[in-house]
Image (spheres, rainbow, N blue to C red):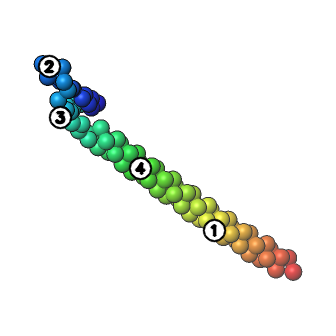
Amino acid sequence: MTEERIITTNHADGTAPANTHTTIIRDDAPRSHGSILLIGLVLLVVAIAGFLLVSEFATSEAAKDNAIAGAANEVNKAACSVGDAAQNAGEAVE
C-alpha cells in the first residue's frame, strides 16, 4: 500500500511558502513470486498425471480390443472345425 501526503508549512508570519513538497511512504515489502511458482508446479504435476491416466486408459482399451479380436478368431476356427466335421459326417452317410 502506498500512502501519499502533501505537507504544507507556513512561514512564521503566516504566509504560505511558494513551494510544497510531497512525501511518498511505501510500507509494502517487495513480493516474492514463490507462490506463483508453486501453483505452476502443482498445475504441471496435475497435467502430467492426467496425461498418464488418459494414456493408460487408451492402452487398456487397445488390450481389450486385441483380446476380443483373438477370441473372435478362435470362435471362427471352432466354427470351421464343426463345419468340416459336419461335412465329413454327411459324406460318410452317403
Q: Quadrant of the C terminus?
A: bottom right
Of residues 80 and 43, the one drawn nearer to the viewer in this rendering: 43
The residue tagged 1 is: 73
Q: Is residue 28 left or right of residue 88?
A: left
Q: What residue is shown at x 61% (from left), y 61% (from top)?
A: 68
**Relative to residue 54, is residue 76 depicted above or below?**
below
Mark 3 or mark 2, whichever is nearer to me: 2
Q: What residue is shown at x 68% (from left), y 69% (from top)?
A: 76
The residue tagged 2 is: 13
Mark 4 or mark 3, whichever is nearer to me: 3
Could you tell me residue 44's position as x and y percent?
36, 48
In space, the residues marked 3 and 1 are separated at their CA atoms by 98 Å
In space, the residues marked 1 and 2 are separated at their CA atoms by 111 Å
Label annotation for residue 27: none
**N-term mark: 4 or 1:** 4
The residue tagged 4 is: 47
Could you tell me residue 86's position as x and y percent?
79, 72
Q: What residue is shown at x 20% (from left), y 26% (from top)?
A: 16
**N-term mark: 3 or 2:** 2
Residue 62 seen in the current view? yes
**N-term mark: 2 or 4:** 2
In space, the residues marked 4 and 3 are separated at their CA atoms by 60 Å
Q: Is residue 66 left or right of residue 25?
A: right
**Relative to residue 94, is residue 33 depicted above or below?**
above
**Relative to residue 30, is residue 8 depicted above or below?**
above
Q: Is residue 7 left or right of residue 88?
A: left
The residue tagged 3 is: 19
